[in-house]
Every structure is written in structure tokens, then in C-alpha cells.
Image (cartoon, grey):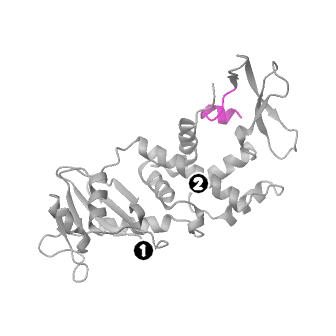
């Protein structure tokens, strides 16, 4: 409980809006002794218990799940196994795990958006861009990486459209003006030059690096390999939004500089997005 208070997830005291009485955080062990639930009791109102923040999970069950997520590389069976090691009386359904992982990824997305204006590149900078996505459930994705800063963007194509107009729109939304854009020779990229972007291409059918311009997309190819690797082994369409998985990937790449601190950073981001009531 002290740890949760220290990182800002909960507070020792809160004031109820109706009666303006201040109440202290209490333990609620009425169900069993396998864990602890937390709640606030208003002694000015009978049976006014606000426990577990509207979750049926024990606090430590949530913390364990956050810890497993923060470590990376996980799947449902591994999560269930780790819970059984902690307490063999704990059982979480795949649906519960999926819902909580989706919630945690949303925390990651908000954390990434908070530190970025959403655009990469700029005058004098090079952005490698590639049309992606056929290997993941038929969904098309556009990704880009700035060579100099290593900033990245990954966005799914709206309505799964993969035409030149959609490419230009996504570029405008995610790349700063003045950037040099390097892509492969897919015809959908022709609109970039027509819209005034500085644009070089490399024909992968002949060369990985263009012999005349030295243009290449090796950084973005490596980025896409990292994205595919970051997806859980059990990933399916039912596993949640693909965009949420991108959010998790960017959170680890942009924010987590020290993996051993990922758990603490995640909890602080959750506390910032969902501060406890006053």
C-alpha cells in the first residue's frame, strides 16, 4: 500500500463530495487472505465502501500484471503460470488479461503522445518511410524513422486504404516540412514529389543502396522487424487494436531507456493519466 501511494496510484486520504468528510484508506480482507483490497469508508454514511477502484482484482494482482507487462515478451499462458507461482488460488481468464493489457497499452499511448508532437524529421533531416502491414492480419501500416534523431512513427492506414492519396495524407500528418523522404519505388509514393516533398527512391529489386544517390531504407526495414518481434506470440485480431501494440512499441523505444525501471515508469504514467480522487 505504501508503494502504491509513493508512486501516486492511490492516496491515504480522500474527501467525499457529498458529506465533505475525510476518510482514510483501509484494508478490506472480508473475502479471503490471499491478497488485500483497498477502500475508503465514510463513517458519515452507512455501507459507503469504495473498494478496489471498481476492479474485481486484488491490488497485488494488478501490480503483478503490470510487472509482467513491463518486462516485455509475454503471453497469456506465461501470465497465468506466473500468477499460480505467486498464489495457486488466483485464476484470471484470458478475457480479463486481454482487457487489462489493452488498458495498460492505452497508458503507454498517452505517455508517448505527451512527449511528442506526433511529427518527425525537419529541415536537413532524412526520413525513411515504407508501406507496411501485409504480414499482420492483412492490415496496412505506414512507418517512418528519422535517421538523425531515431524518432519514429507507425500508423495504420485509415480504412485500410493503401493508395497514393492516403500516403500523402499520412506523410503530412507525421513528417515535418523540409524533410528529405526516402522510400522504395512503389508507385503510390509518386504523389510525394507532386506535393512538393524532397523525395528519393531506391529500387530493392536491384540494389539495397542506390548506387547514384546512396539512398536506402535499411533503418526503417530494421524498425519494422523490431515491431513484428515486439508483438506477443499469441497475437490475433481479438487480442486488441493493432494501434495499441504500436503504442506499446513506441513507449518502450522512446521512453524506456533503462528496462529495469520500466515497471516504476509504467505505474507513474498510469498515476498521471488516472490520478486518484482527492
In the rendered image, the vertical position of residue 130 relative to residue 84, given as above or below: below
Q: Which residue is mark 1?
A: 134
| Label 2 neighbour load within 10 Å: few <14, some 14-19, many 20+ | some
| The C terminus: image quadrant | top right
Q: Residue at x 56, y 67 (%)?
A: 237
**In the image, farthest residue toward the top:** 20
**Callout 1: 10 Å neighbours few (<14), some, many (20+)?**
few
Q: Return the x and y of residue 204 as percentages of the image width and height.
A: 25, 79
Please give the label number shown on residue 161: none
Q: Which mark is residue 102?
A: 2
Question: At 59% across and 50% down in the image, what residue appears?
Answer: 103
Q: Nearer the viewer, residue 83 or 111?
A: 111
Q: Position of residue 98 (x, y in %)?
A: 64, 58
Q: Quadrant of residue 153?
A: bottom left
* Quadrant hosting residue 166: bottom left
Is 55 placed above or below 48 here? below
Numbered disc 2: secondary structure: helix
Indicate left or right for 256 with 170 as reference.
Answer: right
Residue under the image location 53 percent in, 41 percent down: 269
- Quadrant containing the N terminus in the rendered view: top right
Chain part drawn in magenta: 1-12
Where does residue 57 sit, x and y in percent of width and height? Answer: 74, 47
Amino acid at each position: 500500500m505504501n508503494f502504491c501511494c509513493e508512486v501516486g496510484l492511490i492516496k491515504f486520504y480522500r474527501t467525499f463530495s457529498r458529506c465533505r468528510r475525510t476518510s482514510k484508506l483501509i484494508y478490506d480482507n472480508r473475502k479471503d487472505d490471499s491478497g488485500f483490497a483497498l477502500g475508503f469508508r465514510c463513517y458519515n454514511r452507512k455501507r459507503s465502501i469504495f473498494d478496489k477502484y471498481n476492479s474485481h482484482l486484488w491490488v497485488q494482482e494488478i501490480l503483478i500484471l503490470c510487472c509482467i507487462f513491463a518486462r516485455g515478451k509475454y503471453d497469456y499462458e506465461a501470465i497465468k503460470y506466473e500468477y499460480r507461482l505467486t498464489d495457486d488460488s488466483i485464476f484470471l481468464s484470458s478475457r480479463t488479461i486481454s482487457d487489462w493489457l489493452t488498458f495498460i497499452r492505452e497508458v503507454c499511448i498517452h505517455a508517448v503522445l505527451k512527449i511528442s508532437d506526433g511529427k518527425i524529421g525537419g529541415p536537413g533531416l532524412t526520413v525513411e518511410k515504407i508501406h507496411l502491414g501485409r504480414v499482420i492480419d492483412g492490415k496496412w501500416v505506414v512507418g517512418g524513422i528519422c535517421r538523425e534523431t531515431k524518432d519514429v512513427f507507425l500508423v495504420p492506414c485509415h480504412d485500410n486504404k493503401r493508395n497514393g492519396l492516403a500516403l500523402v495524407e499520412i506523410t503530412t500528418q507525421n513528417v515535418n516540412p523540409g524533410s528529405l523522404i526516402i522510400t522504395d519505388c512503389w508507385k503510390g509514393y509518386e504523389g510525394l514529389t507532386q506535393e512538393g516533398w524532397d523525395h528519393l527512391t531506391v529500387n530493392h529489386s536491384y540494389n539495397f543502396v542506390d548506387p547514384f544517390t546512396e539512398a536506402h531504407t535499411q533503418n526503417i526495414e530494421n524498425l519494422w522487424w523490431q515491431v513484428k518481434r515486439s508483438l506477443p506470440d499469441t497475437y490475433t485480431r481479438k487480442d486488441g487494436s493493432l494501434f495499441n501494440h504500436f503504442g506499446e512499441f513506441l513507449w518502450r523505444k522512446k521512453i524506456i531507456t533503462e528496462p529495469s525501471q520500466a515497471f516504476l515508469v509504467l505505474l507513474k504514467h498510469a498515476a498521471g493519466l488516472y490520478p486518484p480522487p482527492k
